Image (tube, grey):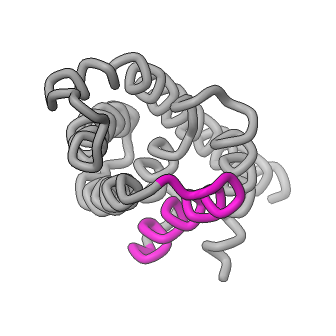
Amino acid sequence: MKEFFKTAGLLLACILLARFIMPANYTPLLAMAVFMPFVTDNKRLQLLLPVSLLLITDLLLGFYGTAMLFVYGTMILIGFLSSYLHKDNVKRLIANSLLSVVLWHIIVNFGVYLTGLGNVSLAQTYLLAIPFDLRLLTSTLLFSVMFFGMRHLVKESSYLGSKSSS
């Protein structure tokens, strides 16, 4: 239960930012999936919280067809990989963020191609997705580093608070 409360603020901020404030594909969703191993050691929470956030926002904004299976599957894959590739340093966090966006681009856009864009080839589908995925890349890197910095500040302030009270 303690782990849930540790992530509640992050979740609320992500819900607000993810789909209601930020422009399309400029969200903290992938950053959250990549960052979850820094928040909790509980592998279930690492996988379920980002997917739950995605589900909640999709419930509010509407579902978008069979391509969402690729979206949810990719989010689960990224959460799974992040939990196993996790090292407590910013370089690894950035590398995992980059990997997550590359996987997202390949898998989700393949799903978009399979579920139909009309007469558009797979190559055209990937090319058309580049502007969206560049926004996803910048937001994932920005939010991942921001989450890392916030975590560091909280840990430092907790350490300083406990040190000054002794």
Q: Quadrant of residue 2?
A: bottom right
Tell me: residue 69, above or below residue 147. below
Answer whether residue 92 is visible to the viewer in this image: no
Q: Quadrant of residue 41?
A: bottom left
Residue nearest the observer in this picture, 157 or 100: 100
Q: Quadrant of the C terminus?
A: bottom right
- Left or right of 32? Residue 116 is left
Tell me: residue 73, above or below residue 71. below
- Left or right of 87? Residue 41 is right
Residue nearest the observer in this picture, 136 or 149: 136
Residue nearest the observer in this picture, 89 or 72: 72
**33 part of magenta stretch:** no
**59 part of magenta stretch:** yes
- Left or right of 17? Residue 82 is left
Answer whether residue 119 is visible to the viewer in this image: yes
Residue 155 locus on image (x, y percent) = 63, 49
Residue 108 locus on image (x, y percent) = 30, 44
Q: Furthest-bottom residue in view?
A: 1
Q: Magenta span: helix, strand or loop, mainly?
A: helix
Q: Quadrant of the N terminus?
A: bottom right
What range of the chain is rendered magenta? 42-64
| Residue at 39% from the left image edge and 73% from the top image edge | 43
Tell me: residue 70, above or below residue 31. below
Residue 142 locus on image (x, y percent) = 52, 26
Residue nearest the observer in this picture, 119 or 99: 119
Residue 164 locus on image (x, y percent) = 81, 49
- Left or right of 82? Residue 55 is right
